[in-house]
Image (tube, helix red, strand yellow):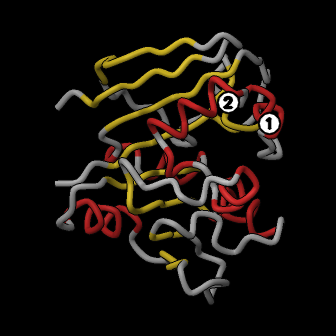
Amino acid sequence: MRKLTYFVACSIDGFIGDPSGDASSMYAYVDEEFLEYLKTEYPETISAEGRRLLGLEWLENRRFDTVVQGRGSYQLGLDAGFPSPYGHLREYVASRTLTESPDPNVTLLSGDLVAAVRALKAEEGEKDVWLCGGSEIAGELADEVDELVIKTYPQIYGSGMPMFGSGFRVADFTLESVRVFGNGTLVRKYVRKR
């Protein structure tokens, strides 16, 4: 069975965006060392536009072949003119308000999100499913997350969008690895205890 990996950036105090959802201040920490890490370990998480700007269209997907994101996260790319921000993956957007997909590569999920993600995880294949964000969809899918990869940037937001926008419940994970970068960024990988 394929895994659902929540690969997400957050502040030291656990917010994935400010109260309006903006997390652009974190981009300052994507320096040469960190970009090399992304290219090597998680190349598919670099957006199609990022790949184009950096001349990285040749990157092959290493871990994921599918991305799932919420409407709010997707809207950021849509507003910037990118209706298929991860065109090198199969894209699914959870939305109760979009009635028509803005791009042929984007499949809208408007029904039972947990059932849809379980179906994606049950598909045959060697690559996993990436949960891109945001807070609400992560909260809804918290019980389906098999792996957490948390990129923690050395910033404090004070308030904003939590990693999991849901009611309180305890879920145990095991720390698998930690990587520290020269700019203070920390990447931790956790696997769910079953």
Q: Is residue 85 left or right of residue 79?
A: left
The residue identified by callout 1 is 18
Q: Is residue 4 above or below residue 86?
A: above
Task: Give the residue drawn at x 79%, y 24%.
Answer: 157
* Quarter of the image where one finds residue 9: top right
Please tell me whether mark 1 sits on a helix, a strand or a loop.
loop
Q: Is residue 139 above or below residue 170?
A: below
Give the image location of residue 89, x and y in percent: 47, 66
Q: What amino acid type is highlighted by mark number 2?
A: Phe
Between 167 and 134, the one nearer to me in the picture? 134
Between 169 and 151, the one nearer to me in the picture? 151
* Quarter in which the C terminus is drawn: top left
* Quarter of the image where one finds residue 25: top right
Task: Give the residue drawn at x 47%, y 41%.
Answer: 42
Gap in angstroms between the C-alphas marked 1 and 2: 7 Å
Q: Is residue 16 left or right of residue 115?
A: right
Mark 2: few, some, or many residues within 10 Å (few <14, many ≥20)?
Answer: many
Q: Which mark is residue 15?
A: 2
Between 88 and 162, the one nearer to me in the picture? 88
Q: Is residue 114 above or below residue 36?
A: below
Give the image location of residue 29, x and y in percent: 74, 26
Q: Is residue 149 left or right of residue 127?
A: right
Task: Give the residue drawn at x 57%, y 50%.
Answer: 133
Please tell me whether mark 2 sits on a helix, a strand or a loop.
strand
Check contact, mark 1 vs mark 2: CB within 8 A.
yes
Q: Which mark is residue 129?
A: none
Task: Give the residue drawn at x 50%, y 52%.
Answer: 44
